[in-house]
Amino acid sequence: MDIKKSGAALMAAVVFLGLLTVLTSAFVANIGIAWSRMERGQLQAKAFWVAEAGIQKALLEIEESHGSYAGEEFLFGDGKCIISVKKNQDDDFTIFSTGKVGHQDMKKTIAARISVKCNDNGKFTTKVVRWLDCGGNDFEKAIIQ
């Protein structure tokens, strides 16, 4: 057997293994990135639903308290919801609800402008005039018109 031929075969095997290692590393890195994006998407969805629950709670509280509800913080599942209610002119309110979930504090803020009216039966009813997804902004920074 010729030494040059066995050296070339060894070099070809080393190059092949090196290329295989690089491709495997890239594949594993892509799987890690995809997994991270999937987890982030799940956290964003959870934060959205926690914020939505806050809006629904605020609507009920405003209706039951005849407009004197100012907001609160509460735990909801594995998340936390922060509600702030701002009284506008007449019987108009703006609700800001921020849902936070996960160890990274993924945030989602929803704002809703509502109108509270007293009907003929003496019961207060709420009507959503405008609804806005403010993304990850805090409610102090979100503006709804």
Image (cartoon, helix red, strand yellow):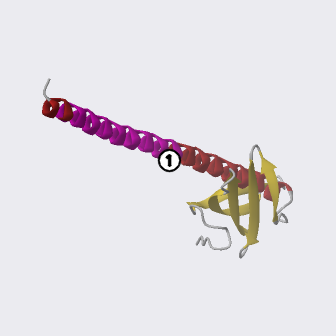
> Residue at the location (74% across, 71% down)?
86
Nearest the eye: 107 or 85: 107
Q: Number of marks in the image?
A: 1
Q: Is residue 108 above or below residue 41?
A: below
- Residues drawn in magenta: 8-37
Image quarter where the C terminus lies is: bottom right
Secondary structure of the residue carrying tag 1 is helix
Nearest the eye: 35 or 92: 35
Residue 74, percent across and down? 81, 54
Residue 134, percent across and down? 57, 63
Q: Is residue 21 left or right of residue 119?
A: left
Neighbor class of circle 1 (other Cα within 10 Å; few <14, some 14-19, many 20+) is few
> Residue at the location (66% across, 55% down)?
104
Is 21 covered by the magenta stretch?
yes
Q: Is residue 21 left or right of residue 92?
A: left
Residue 50, percent across and down? 69, 49
Q: Is residue 76 above or below residue 71?
A: above
Q: Residue furthest bottom?
A: 89
Q: Is residue 75 above or below residue 143?
A: above
Note whether residue 110 is visible: yes
Q: Main secondary structure of the magenta part?
A: helix
What is the quadrant of residue 113 in the picture?
bottom right
Nearest the eye: 80 or 143: 80
Residue 43, percent across and down? 61, 47
The residue beneath circle 1 is 37
What is the quadrant of residue 97 in the picture?
bottom right
Label 1 is placed on what type of residue? Answer: Arg
Q: Is residue 30 left or right of residue 18?
A: right
Nearest the eye: 138 or 28: 28
Image quarter where the N terminus lies is: top left
